[in-house]
Amino acid sequence: MSKPFTPKVVTANHLLAGDVIYQTATGWTRDLAEAEVLTDEADADLRLIEASQQVDEVVGAYLADVKVENDTPQPVHFREDFRATGPSNYAHGKQVELR
């Protein structure tokens, strides 16, 4: 018996900048709140294939579990929470922008 499909987003790293990015319906964003939430397994697999083919823009694309709260995707796993906010040693980059 397979596990039920849970909501996901496609995430990767920007090839040149190295930033964590998320797939939207029309491109990529650095903000998880703007990511396209995928609720259908077949659709998620297709979106991941599309992302993986963008070798001139992204690297390491994969599906990340999310939960939706107030119509906004939230990380489920601590790794994705860390990736969404950036390094935690001091406030810089995304941490400053998201405040």
Image: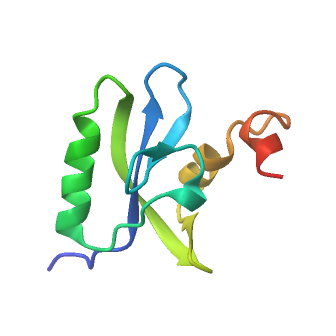
Q: Give the side of residue 60 with respect to residue 91, left or right.
A: left
Depicted 3 relative to depicted 57: above or below: below
Q: Residue furthest top?
A: 16
Pick the residue in front: 87 or 44.
44
Quadrant in the picture for residue 97: top right
Which residue shows up at 25% across the image and 76% down it? Answer: 3
Pick the residue in front: 39 or 34.
34
Residue 19: give x, y in percent of width and height: 56, 32
Which residue shows up at 39% across the image and 71% down it? Answer: 7
Residue 4: give x, y in percent of width and height: 27, 79
The N terminus lies in quadrant: bottom left
Depicted 59 relative to depicted 62: above or below: above
Q: Give the side of residue 9 with respect to residue 70, left or right.
A: left
Pick the residue in front: 2 or 35.
35
Which residue shows up at 59% across the image and 61% down it? Answer: 33
Residue 81: give x, y in percent of width and height: 61, 54
Residue 38: give x, y in percent of width and height: 35, 67
Pick the residue in front: 57 or 44.
57
Which residue shows up at 85% across the image and 35% down it? Answer: 90
